[in-house]
Amino acid sequence: MIADLRALVEVESPSRDVAALARSAEVVAGVIESRLGGRAELVGSDGGPHVRWSGGGEPRVLVLGHHDTVFPLGTLERRPFTVEDGRATGPGVFDMLGGLVQAVHGLATLDDLTGVEILVSADEEVGSYHSRELIEERALACGAVLVPEGAADGGALKTGRKGAGAFRVTVTGRAAHAGLEPEAGVNALVEAAHQVRRIAALARPELGTTVTPTVAAAGTVENVVPAHASVTVDVRVESAAEKERVEAGFAALTPELDGAGLTVEGSVRRPPMPASASAQLFALARRLLPGVGGTEVGGGSDGNFTAALGVPTLDGLGAVGGGAHADHEYLLVDAMAERARLLAGLAEACRNGR
């Protein structure tokens, strides 16, 4: 597993870099074929190639992951793959290359892989715009989904996830000299500030809804009233009702300053993954690995899409570690075999209709 993990980390696979993702997909396919046999298909898309493998027969369970990472090319030179003091480090080890390796090696312990499918997408980190349709198609065909994303704190499985989305509010104003005649302008930055207060007020923490302005830009130079501004907002919700309320709130935004204009783009793209979607599979996981915990988390994954279809979905089956998307990302080596066996046991039960 360590050798295969090194191979995946060292190819580097930043989202949206189609050439890098093509190289990564080849390596992922090679690892799958070398451990499980058969042929892994590369499914082309504008976001990069997805990797699909089938054990044949009637589909019963989908192992769903992604091979894109958030780290730009060159990160490996600064943070090379390392195994030291029981920890593997390097870009993508926890989210989610370690989980992919564990899943493949776990499946390799099974005598019969009939009914098992693997789908590894190329664009999960940037919204799955080019893979969602394929993911939903295969999830419905298989009837159960296992997601080897990194585990929650303490190795807990992810039994529920918030819905997630992003919005961009663009403000248009009118430029003017900031010293000679500021009153002749329409200050897009001031308008954006008004909108940020309204946007932040859409949050309902008591309902699990967070609405967080995260990126803002405005202006050109210090002596010009800014004619343009933009605000990007991260949104997380626990229910479909909150998704609709927040989307309606963004749609209802109107300018406060005379002469200002607003454009709102975005949505809560990933629907919530309710705990009910994972209940049956989580109970099975606890029989296979007594004491394993479960928790609901704020981050989204492709499991949100499959759970929203009503397909039983269990997430967080991948690496035990932490630091996703950060320089201190790590994976606990000693937990790899146990998690590989857990996923294999779940896949076997799903394959056999249990």
Image (tube, helix red, strand yellow):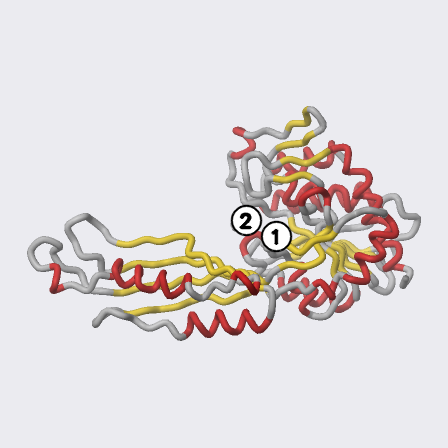
Q: Is residue 69 above or below residue 75?
A: below
Side of 260 relative to 114 (left or right): left
Say what amino acid the circle numbered 2 marks.
Ser
Q: Position of residue 80 (x, y in %)?
A: 59, 29
Q: Is 30 left, or right, of 45 in this rendering? A: right
Classify mark 1: helix, strand or loop: loop
Kindly tell me whether residue 27 is visible in this rendering. no
Q: Amino acid at mark 1?
A: Ala
Residue at 53% x, 41% y is 71
For residue 31, which quarter of the picture? top right
- Residue at point 54% right, 35% down? 327
Q: Earlier in the sequence, mark 2 or mark 1?
A: 2
Give the residue at mark 2.
Answer: 15
- In the rendered view of the protein, which quadrant contains the C terminus? bottom right
Residue projecting furthest to the top: 85
Q: Classify residue 120 as left or right of residue 33.
A: left
Q: Which mark is residue 29?
A: none
Indicate the position of residue 157 as horizontal and vertical percent values: 73, 50
Q: Is residue 138 above or below residue 124?
A: below
Few, some or many residues within 10 Å of mark 2 (<14, 14–19, 20+): many
| Residue at image mark 1 | 122
Q: Are marks 2 and 1 in contact (CB under 8 Å)?
A: yes
Residue 145 at least partly seen: yes
Looking at the rendering, which quadrant does residue 33 occupy?
A: top right
